[in-house]
Amino acid sequence: MYRKNKAVKMSIFKIISSLLIAAGLTACGGGGGNGSAPVASTPGTTNTSAATVARLVLAVQSGSPASITASGNTSTIVTVRALDASNALVKNAVVALSASGNSFLDNSTVVTDGTTGLATVTLSADPADQTSRTATLTATCTACSASAATLGVPVTGATLTVSQVGSTAMSVGGNTVTIKATVNDSLGHG
């Protein structure tokens, strides 16, 4: 009798387990499907399941500095936009990023937001390089037809200022003139 009760309990357990698994798969969409069911979209955005990224756009985010200093103490936030052929924002698009000009990004890959279709990345400069230069940010999308997008961000480095002290005119073989040279780091500290 014990074996019979155990067999009945196991059968009931298997049936309940199967029903729970089936209910779970139904609730999440079945785990597969043919992708033909429409997916809701925020106005002005497109789902990547139905759209191809046709263009990438990079821009300094509103309110973020348009340039950075070579000190490494400043950064700027860049907005990444992935657009379809109709210029609608594409949600969940994977975008690879790189930076040149001795600059750094906080992420080398971003995914556009599932609601807004936007992504952001933070750009800062390497403080070991105190030259004035342009940091170039490049965005690419390997799984789409979009060309690479680039954005140049000015980096202010150290400066050298040379000036004459006093009002004595300079002449070859003439009076001694004092010249002052001032070197300031990218933050203006001498």
Image: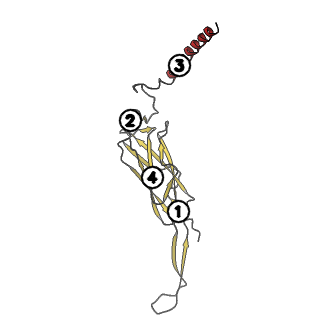
Mark 2–mark 4 Cα distance, whole angstroms, equals 24 Å
Q: Earlier in the sequence, mark 1 or mark 2?
A: 2
Task: State the SS at label 1.
Answer: loop
What is the crowding at mark 3: few (fewer than 14 residues within 10 Å), some, or many (at least 20)?
A: few
Q: Earlier in the sequence, mark 4 or mark 1?
A: 1
Q: Nearer the viewer, residue 168 or 102?
A: 102
Q: Position of residue 22 (x, y in %)?
A: 51, 19
| Residue 180 vertical position relative to residue 148 in the rendered view, above or below | below
Give the label on residue 140, or none.
none
Mark 1–mark 2 Cα distance, whole angstroms, equals 40 Å
Q: Amino acid at mark 4?
A: Ser
| Residue 8 vertical position relative to residue 167 in the rendered view, above or below | above
Q: Earlier in the sequence, mark 4 or mark 3?
A: 3
Q: Position of residue 182 (x, y in %)?
A: 55, 75
The residue wearing badge 3 is 23
What is the crowding at mark 2: few (fewer than 14 residues within 10 Å), some, or many (at least 20)?
A: some
The residue wearing badge 4 is 98
Q: Position of residue 24 (x, y in %)?
A: 53, 22
Residue 11, quarter of picture: top right
Q: Are marks 2 and 3 in contact (CB under 8 Å)?
A: no
Q: Residue at x 54, y 55 (%)?
A: 75
Mark 4–mark 3 Cα distance, whole angstroms, equals 44 Å
Q: Earlier in the sequence, mark 2 or mark 3?
A: 3
Q: Nearer the viewer, mark 2 or mark 4?
A: 4
Would you say residue 126 is visible in this rendering? yes
What is the crowding at mark 1: few (fewer than 14 residues within 10 Å), some, or many (at least 20)?
A: many
Q: Nearer the viewer, mark 4 or mark 1?
A: 4
